[in-house]
Amino acid sequence: MEKDEQIGLVVLIGGLVLACVLAVIGFGVYTTSPGYRNVSVKTQAGIPQGEPVARIYFNLGSDELPEEAGGAIQTLKEKIAANPKAQVLISGFHDPSGDPVKNAELAKERAMATQKALIGVGVPAERIVLRKPEQLTDTADMQEARRVDIHLQ
């Protein structure tokens, strides 16, 4: 193996190790952030069952709840009131472009904005669970990656 190939291999391995370290650090940030609960749900492996009862799409780079989300929040309030034992599961999504740690943080902030809106209309905070942000890798429509899904479990 030539010296240039050896250097390239060392750089590649170093980059992979750094990426793994950053991923571990990033995971710790999500699970220890105040106001963020990473709680397992009483379904198979904590995965939401069925289609979401609401899906809210956010603007690029923003965690501000869009104006058109008001109708979805009100509908959710009514569905939650009609299901007093149901738990609300909020899942934030992001795309693979850019900094994955910043993208996941933005997805978490979007989920938290949705949580705050639901609490604001009277949904008890103890009935709301936030899932760890998920990265979408196989979507052609990047709008799908800037969303929050809400399930009732």
Image (tube, grey):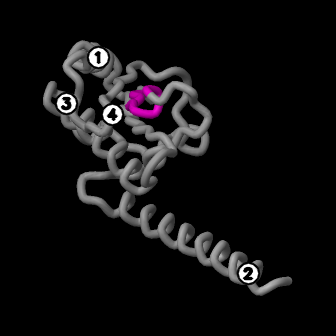
Seen in the image, is 75 located left or right of residue 148?
A: left
Residue 20 drawn above or below residue 121: below
Q: Which residue is mark 1?
A: 72
Sequence-earlier tag: 1 or 2: 2
Q: Residue 125 appears at what percent x and percent y?
A: 23, 39
SS of the residue under disc 1? helix
The disc labelled 4 sits on which kind of residue? Leu
The quarter of the picture where the C terminus appears is top left
SS of the residue under disc 3? helix
Q: Residues within 10 Å of mark 1 (few under 14, many from 20)?
A: some
Q: Which residue is mark 2?
A: 4
Label number found at residue 117:
3
Residue depth check, mark 1 versus mark 4: number of the one nearer the observer: 4
Residue depth check, mark 2 versus mark 4: number of the one nearer the observer: 2
Residue depth check, mark 3 versus mark 2: number of the one nearer the observer: 2
Asked if residue 118 can be seen in this view, the reply is no
Sequence-earlier tag: 3 or 1: 1
Sequence-earlier tag: 2 or 4: 2
Looking at the image, do the residues carrying marks 3 and 4 touch, with CB atoms under 8 Å apart? no
Quick check: is 20 in the magenta stretch?
no
Seen in the image, is 16 located left or right of residue 5?
A: left
The residue at 55%/28% (across/down) is 49
The magenta stretch is 143-150
The disc labelled 1 sits on which kind of residue? Ala
Residue depth check, mark 1 versus mark 2: number of the one nearer the observer: 2
Residue 98 drawn above or below residue 84: below
Query: How far is disc 2 from disc 4 in space, using C-alphas?
Result: 41 Å
The disc labelled 2 sits on which kind of residue? Asp
Q: Which residue is mark 4?
A: 60
